[in-house]
Amino acid sequence: MLGAGIVSEVFDARGQGLPAFDFALCTDRPGRVRTDVGLPLVVDHGLDRLAAADLVIALPWADFRRPPAPAVLDALTAAHARGALVAAHCVGAFALAAAGLLDGRRATTHWRFAGLLAERHPEVTVEPDALYVDQGTVVTGAGAAAGFDLCLHLLRREYGATTANAIARDLVLPSHRDGGQAQYLATPVPEDSRDERLTDVLAWARENLHQPLPVAELARRALMSRRSFARRFAASTGTTPHAWLLGLRLSRAEELLETTELPVEEIARAVGFGSAAVLRAQFVRRRGVPPRAYRRSFSRTP
């Protein structure tokens, strides 16, 4: 029920200049479907609805240890073959693996079942710690609420940062968490005042991306040694300060490219890359296209 709720909320028809998604739930047996919380869900569409879909997301299901019906596997394979983007989060990844769509690719699933996915499908490179893994035409995400991260990543990828951020704000969600961020943190809630200082420092860093922001400076502001800061940072965010800052700078650059006419050189300085050449190199690595090409695709300016 959670998986269905996540995708239906993210791809709701909101208006207000946002994309008008044509959302539908499909199953091989249309009608009443019993969910994991006991509530029945009426699904009107059969697998034929997938034939016209641009995006197909395989949702988690209770009996994931058994392969889906052959008709489901055929429909997933056919959708991918004709060019649809195929995704899954949580144990929905088992359906894509059973269809052979993850063969030779990297993928993730709920951390609790990552070992089982790797055991059942040795041809798949399973990354148990990733929030989501984007392999181009096939994208997989972690479990439970990480489905939101997968869906927001898909929105950011296809529609740009402005659309993804607007929908995230509507859902009161973080606008972006990088796919390499850890699924599961051993200490997900603050333990002491050091975490409060860390939160304050991260907020300060977001407002000062134009500065170099070396780890030593962040640690000094948090009143910690560099080593303690790095350890607390990893425990609280699941990533390193360098990776966190890089993702933040690139996300801000995307927004500025979409919503302003600032020259690329000026955007590079505003987000802390120093030069257009450095921004271009990092942008191509993340997006696969240079900043100017990204702007042509996603610009919101007249």
Image (spheres, rainbow, N blue to C red):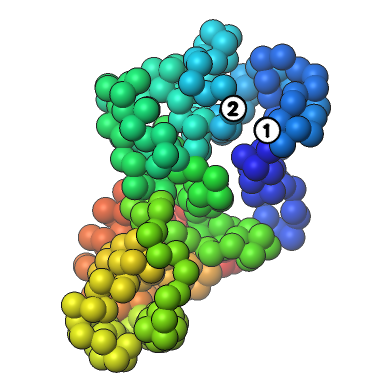
Question: Residue at horizontal 37%, vertical 35%?
Answer: 114
Q: Assign the C terminus to one quadrant of the image.
A: bottom right
Q: Which amino acid does label 1 sit on?
A: Asp
Question: Residue at horizontal 19%, vertical 81%?
Answer: 226
Residue 112 position within the rendered picture, expressed as x and y whole percent measured from the top left: 42, 39
Query: Secondary structure under badge 1?
Result: loop
Residue 29 position within the rendered picture, expressed as x and y whole percent measured from the top left: 72, 14
Q: How far apart are marks 1 and 2 (CA)?
A: 7 Å
Q: In this view, does 87 lie to the left or right of 42?
A: left
Give the answer, above or below, for where 263 lies relative to 68.
Answer: below
Q: Which residue in the protein does label 1 denote?
A: 36
| Front position in the image: 214 or 233 | 233
Give the answer, above or below, for where 147 lies relative to 165.
Answer: above
Residue 208, image quadrant? bottom left
Q: Which amino acid does label 2 sit on?
A: Ala
Q: In this view, does 40 lie to the left or right of 205?
A: right
Q: In this view, does 293 lie to the left or right of 273?
A: right
Residue 11, image quadrant? top right
State which tag comes first along the sequence, 1 or 2: 1
| Front position in the image: 163 or 58 | 58
Q: Which residue in the protein does label 2 denote?
A: 62
Residue 264 position within the rendered picture, expressed as x and y whole percent measured from the top left: 35, 71
Identity of the residue furthest to the top in this view = 70
Residue 214, can we see it? no
Give the answer, above or below, for where 218 lies relative to 255.
Answer: below
Identity of the residue furthest to the front in this view = 191
Marks 1 and 2: CB-CB under 8 Å? yes
